[in-house]
Amino acid sequence: MDEEEIEFLGQSQLQVSYTSDHVWTQATTRNQAGVNPKLDNIILDTSTSSKDRGIVISDSRNKENDLAAGEDKVPWSDMVMFDLTRAFRDAEMKPSELQYMIRSNIMSGSSASKTQGYIEEAIKRIKGNRSRVNTFRSDPAAPGILPDEVAAYQLLAGSDHVHRVLLMLNDYPSTMKNVRVESLSVTTPATEGAEEVYNIVIKFTKLDAP
């Protein structure tokens, strides 16, 4: 994991535990040989740090690049959970101990274009600053939260880049028991340390009870 790619994590308002000194386990999922003739046939690219309890989704193009037959397609939830479980297993950690996921480099493709629009609209809803990290909490009962922040969170939750993550939690109810999304933090190309790309930092919390 290139430190410059996630430099924005050092901004104080994110409150994410992260250091470049820790080992990030990279995993790349591609089509089976011969299924996709494209040179660039990556379906999923992840980097996971058990020490930081984080996973970065740096490339996710199963819609564009997965040309396998319907019954042979692997769900996004399964691919991400496989990478997460494998990286955490060596540290004797459970996947439910995950604290954050970064949907990084949201820059190309129809899905990315829509998510960029959602990010911009969410920032406008709270009268935020595009050059700073903007955070949207999920709990309507959170201290000081206003209706515009709730609406902005819900808007982003409907994007492919967040909705897939919510589906993953539902797809693995035992593995990710009582794990919920606490907040969504976003960057734009104008944000310091964000490598001039859009990113979403998804922070998780584990409830004592459902």
Image (cartoon, grey):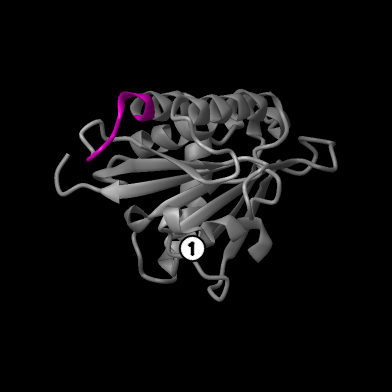
Quadrant (top left, top right, bottom left, bottom right) of the C terminus: top left
Foreground residue, 190 or 34? 190
Where is residue 169 drawn, in percent x and y?
36, 39
Foreground residue, 148 or 25? 148
Q: Is residue 157 left or right of residue 35?
A: left
Foreground residue, 185 or 131? 131
Q: Residues within 10 Å of mark 1 (few under 14, many from 20)?
A: many
Q: Residue at x 47, y 29 (%)?
A: 156
Q: Residue at x 62, y 46 (%)?
A: 191
Where is residue 125 drawn, in percent x and y?
46, 25
Tell me the magenta residue range: 143-149
Where is residue 83 drawn, in percent x and y?
52, 54
Pointer 1 residue = 87
Amino acid on which disc 1 is placed: Ala
Quick one: which residue is furthest to the left in this view?
A: 209
Q: Is residue 1 visible?
A: no
Q: Is residue 113 left or right of residue 15?
A: right
Q: Quadrant of residue 47?
A: bottom right
Residue 191 on the magenta segment: no
Q: Is residue 35 left or right of residue 87?
A: right
Q: Residue at x 57, y 64 (%)?
A: 25
Foreground residue, 95 or 3? 3
Quadrant (top left, top right, bottom left, bottom right) of the N terminus: bottom right
Q: Is residue 91 visible?
A: yes
Q: Is residue 128 left or right of residue 183?
A: right
Residue 144 on the magenta segment: yes
